[in-house]
Amino acid sequence: MARSQAIPADILKIAECIWQRIDVRGPDDCWEWQGRRGVTGYGRVFLPGGKNWMAHRLAAALSGKVPGAGEYVCHTCDNPPCCNPNHLWVGTEAENVADMVRKGRQHHPRGELSSSVKLSADVIDEIRLRDRPRKELARKFGVTVYTIDDVRRARSWQHIPFSDEAAAARDAVRRSRRAKATGAA
Ligand SMILES: [Zn+2]
């Protein structure tokens, strides 16, 4: 009976909001969540009713990889904000742990902290200027885009003061984020 019914507008609206916040790229690229992130780097989505979801979990479900209760949505790319369904797989807790162990992440779930050691104080400002795509900078310095984000958001290298130019770039992004957030509300 429901076969030919229109999908309720509120459901379509939620799906649309989620895809709008994903930086969709080529099929093999990481599609990073552009909205709010938790401390571990996973995208967070606040849905009506106060429920807080992980963005990659919703992206997987919307793409037909629906995790059951107790199942995890894991990344083949090991990039927490990534929502590319091609990089996501559904696994049990045991499979998820085995995957992390295999990747050598079990003692440092924030592996980017160690990779940020590849950076040095004199390149921090270059990253904070935001005048080049983070993917390009990540490649240049041999770190993940998430490490670049951490630097830009001062989650790492906080002890290095922002230059005036870098502070201006940061404030511009904050302003546009705020404008976007109030515009969407
Ligand atoms: Zn990915």
Image: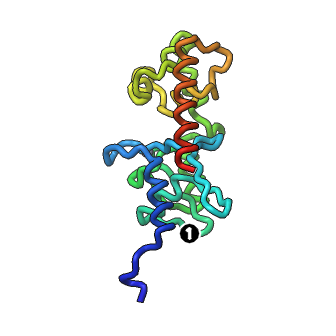
Measured as percent of width and height from the top left, residue 164 is found at 57, 11
Q: Is residue 124 above or below residue 100?
A: above
Q: Is residue 1 above or below residue 171?
A: below
Where does label 1 land, which residue? Answer: 68
Measured as percent of width and height from the top left, residue 57 is found at 53, 57
Q: Type of residue at label 1?
A: Gly
Q: Secondary structure at mark 1?
A: loop
Density class for disc 1 (Cα within 10 Å; few <14, some 14-19, many ≥20) is: few
Q: Is residue 80 visible?
A: no
Q: Which image quarter is the N terminus in?
A: bottom left
Along the line of sight, which residue is nearer the eye, 1 or 94? Answer: 1
| Outermost residue, bottom side | 1
| Outermost residue, left side | 26
Along the line of sight, which residue is nearer the eye, 177 or 183? Answer: 183
What's the residue at 36%, 42% (across, down)? 29
Q: Is residue 67 visible?
A: yes
Say whether residue 30 is left or right of residue 51. left
Say whether residue 169 is left or right of residue 137. right
Along the line of sight, which residue is nearer the eye, 129 or 108? Answer: 129
Along the line of sight, which residue is nearer the eye, 9 or 28? Answer: 9
Measured as percent of width and height from the top left, residue 43 is found at 56, 47
